[in-house]
Each structure stands twice: as structure tokens, then as C-alpha cells.
Image (spheres, grey):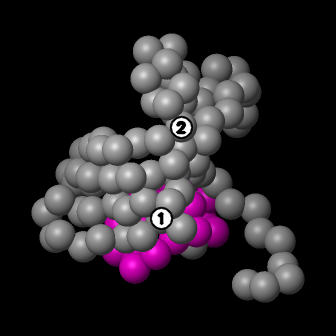
Amino acid sequence: MEGSRLTVAAGDLDGDGAADLAYAGTLDEVSSLSLIFQKIEATRSKVCTGKHIASATLRTDSDSYEITNAAVSCTSGGVMGVDDWQQMKLSGGQMKHTRSGHVTLLK
């Protein structure tokens, strides 16, 4: 909504405070997708130092998504009772739901 501010949790596209990776995978495009997880140094060194993801797979319990040609920006710190976290913001590529074939553009 133009002109309004909205507090959004990581991956929360509908404003309910829950992560919505599966919901993002049903849209035609999103302005960016943020993921927050506990920081793992090996992940940070592989993903955050490159600033570009040519190809990667995100997996949930029941689904998987192929990310291609996305830019990534990373921050870390403490949030929501977790002292050691990593936030990745994905933009500028696409996310394909591997089961349905639906493609979401990451603007």
C-alpha cells in the first residue's frame, strides 16, 4: 500500500507475522524475499560474500524452490530472543516451485 508503513516478519507477505515462503511461491512477483535463520558461518561465507546466487535450492518440510540469478544482501545480529541470526534478502531473480513449476519473480 502506497504511503503506509507496515511491519513485516521475515518472509511474511500477508502481514500475519508468520513466514510465508510457500505463499510467496504462489505469487507472480514479490519486491524481495527475506529469510531469517540462525547464523551458520559456513552458510554466510558461501552465500553472503558472493552477493549473487546463480542457482540454489530452498527446501521446506514439504516443498522445494529453485532460486536463480538472484542478488543477495545479508545482515546479522540478534532478534526475537535469538542472539545469533542471519537475514538474507533475495531480489532480482526468480524462484520456481519445483513441484508445480510456478515461477515467482523477485524484484
Q: In this view, does 29 lie to the left or right of 10?
A: left
Q: Is residue 12 above or below residue 3?
A: above
In percent of width and height, residue 11 lies at 53, 55
Q: What's the residue at 62%, 36% (across, down)?
A: 74
For residue 103: magenta?
no
Given residues 68 and 7, the one toward you in this image is 68
Name the quarter where the C terminus is drawn: bottom right
Hey, which quadrant is residue 101 in on the image?
bottom left
Q: What's the residue at 44%, 15% (across, down)?
A: 42
Q: Is mark 2 on a helix, strand or loop?
A: loop
**Crowd tier of the residue under label 1, counting other residues whose Cα lies within 10 Å: few below 14, some 14–19, many 20 or above:** many
In percent of width and height, residue 20 lies at 46, 60
Instruction: State the residue lying farthest toward the bottom.
Output: 2
Report how far apart the C-alphas of labels 2 and 1 lie in the structure.
15 Å
For residue 32: magenta?
yes
Q: Is residue 34 left or right of residue 52?
A: right
Tag of residue 36:
none
Residue type beneath disc 1: Leu
Disc 2: which residue = 51
Residue type beneath disc 2: Lys
Given residues 104 and 81, the one toward you in this image is 104
Q: What's the residue at 63%, 69% (across, down)?
A: 15
Given residues 32 and 86, the one toward you in this image is 32
Q: Is mark 1 on a helix, strand or loop?
A: strand
Labels 2 and 1 touching (C-beta < 8 A)? no
Q: What's the residue at 43%, 60% (across, down)?
A: 93
Report if residue 40 is visible in the image: no
Q: Is the magenta stretch mostly helix, strand or loop?
A: loop
Disc 1: which residue = 106
In percent of width and height, residue 47 lies at 46, 30
The stretch in magenta equals 15-33
Instruction: State the residue lying farthest toward the left.
Output: 99
